[in-house]
Image: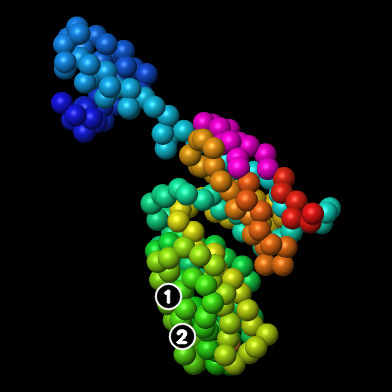
Amino acid sequence: MSVSDVIPDRSSRQPKPRNLAIWARFTSPGRCLLGHILSVAVLLLTVPGQSSAGELVGSVTAGRRPVREAVLFVEALRSPLLHERAMMDQRRRTFLPHVMAVQVGTRVEFPNHDLVYHNVFSTRDGKPFDLGLYPVGQTMEVVFRQPGLIRLFCNIHSNMSAFIWVVENGYFTVTDRAGRFHIPGVPAGSRTVRVWHERLGTRVLTVNVPAEGSVPLEVNLGS
Ligand SMILES: [Cu+2]
C-alpha cells in the first residue's frame, strides 16, 4: 500500500487528518509491515501542508510616508495559476496600472484605449518583446513564462513606462495608495518575501508565516 492508495480512501470517508490517525490506529493490524506502512502514510497526511496558511498584512513606508505601487511577493513557492488573464491598459499616453504583478503563465492583454497609436516594447530583463505599432481599439497579448521584472516602454512616447513583476506563485500584491497590502493563503513556514519599488529599491525579508491567522509586517524602504 502506498500513500496514493490511502488518499482516495481519505477523500471517500472525508475524515479530518486527526480522525484519520485514530481510524488508522484501530484498523492497523498490530506491528505487521502493513501497519507500519499505513502509519507512515498517515503521518505524511497529517504533516501540516498547503492547508495550513496564514496571511501577510501590513504597509510599506519610506520614513513616515506611505509607499504606493510597491510589489511584495513570496519567493521559492509554486501554486496553481490563479488568474489566466491580466490587463495593462493604455489611456491618455499612460500605462495603467504603472506597476503590476502577475503569475508565470498569465496572458497579459495590452489594449490601446487611447486616441493615438502606441508601440509597446520591452528590452531589458525578463522577456524582451516588441508588439509593433498598433492602433486605437486593438489589443495585443503576451504570455509571460519566465519569472522576473519586465520594464515596459513605448516607441512613440518616450515618457511612457511601466513595470510588470512576473512571479512563480499566487502570493503577491501591489500596495495601495496608503501603502497597505494583504497577501492571503500563504503556506505556513519560514518564507522569503521580496519587497520592490521602482525608485526605493528592494528588501528581502524572512517571515514566519503561521498556520492560521495573520502576521503583521511593516516595511520601511526609506532607510
Ligand atoms: Cu505610446
The residue most toward the top is 30
- Residue annotated with mark 1: 142
Mark 2: few/some/many CA within 10 Å (<14, 14-19, 20+): some
Which residue is disc 2 drawn over?
Answer: 131
Say whether residue 19 is left or right of residue 182. left
Of residues 149 and 5, the one drawn nearer to the viewer in this rendering: 149
The mark that comes first in sequence, 2 or 1, is 2
Tag 2 and tag 1, C-beta contact below 8 Å: yes
Mainly helix, strand or loop, the magenta region?
strand
Q: Amino acid at mark 1?
A: Val
Residue at horizontal 57%, vertical 66%? 100
Local SS, label 2: loop
On the image, the x and y values in percent for residue 141 come to 42, 77
Q: Residue at x 41, y 34 (%)?
A: 49
In terms of image quarters, where does ligand 1 lie?
bottom right
Question: What residue range appears in magenta?
Answer: 206-217
User: Residue 40's spot in the image, x, y percent?
Assistant: 28, 22
Report how far apart the C-alphas of labels 2 and 1 lie in the structure.
9 Å
Q: Residue at x 19, y 7 (%)?
A: 30
